[in-house]
Amino acid sequence: MNELDVVGVRVEMPSNQPIVLLREVGGDRYLPIWIGPGEATAIAFAQQGMAPARPLTHDLFKDVLEAVGQELSEVRITDLREGVFYAELVFASGVEVSARPSDAIALALRTGTPIYGSDGVLDDAGIAIPDEQEDEVEKFREFLDQISPEDFGTNSQ
């Protein structure tokens, strides 16, 4: 498993499909995952430290975990099958619960929980861009402007 940071959320044009971009900590791979608009909003709110007047579902889930004394110890993006990403919530008690990556990421950001990606997922869907190659990073940003979910054979997660 490789630790991942959330780079951000953007909307892919012209389809208006949101994408969350993760970056391998200490590595040079990026992982793009297409997500739904609700999850994109939840992730963006958490990254910006915004608190809605009423809790969103992920805020509620965090509050419930705190109320029942459960700690989320890590989020794992475990698999990519037929264009669909899979994730697990791993609790301090050892319990593991299957989740959509978008929901898992939104919850991890709210709880300060680390996010990990399996070697297989990063090998299959990761895009390598060495940090020292700034022009390559710019090319990647341009690439993100041009790609669509169909290019990766993925659907909303």
Image: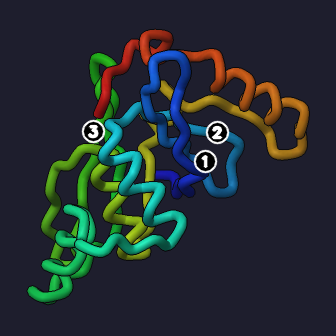
Residue type for callout 3? Tyr
Q: Nearer the viewer, residue 51 or 92?
A: 51
**Is residue 109 left or right of 4 when viewed as pictured?**
left
Q: Earlier in the sequence, mark 3 or mark 1?
A: 1
* Residue 140 coordinates in the image, percent (x, y): 73, 28
Residue type for callout 2? Arg
* Residue 120 coordinates in the image, percent (x, y): 43, 33
Q: Which mark is residue 86?
A: 3
* Residue 92 coordinates in the image, percent (x, y): 23, 78
Task: Please name the residue shown 37% across and 65% down the image.
Answer: 108
Quarter of the image where one finds residue 70: bottom left
Task: Please name the residue shown 68% across and 48% down the image.
Answer: 27
**Pointer 2 residue:** 29
- Residue contact between numbered discs 2 and 1, judged by CB atoms under 8 Å: yes
Task: Please name the residue shown 64% across and 39% down the image.
Answer: 29
Indicate whether 88 appears above or below 82: below
In this view, the residue farthest toward the left is 68
Q: Earlier in the sequence, mark 3 or mark 2?
A: 2
- Using the numbered discs, state the Cα–Cα distance from disc 3 to disc 1 in whole angstroms: 17 Å
The crowding category of the residue bearing disc 1, from other C-alpha atoms within 10 Å (few below 14, some 14 to 19, many at least 20), is many
**Is residue 111 left or right of 13 when viewed as pictured?**
left
Residue type for callout 1? Arg
**Pointer 1 residue:** 23
- Using the numbered discs, state the Cα–Cα distance from disc 2 to disc 1 in whole angstroms: 6 Å
The crowding category of the residue bearing disc 3, from other C-alpha atoms within 10 Å (few below 14, some 14 to 19, many at least 20), is some
In this view, the residue farthest toward the front is 53
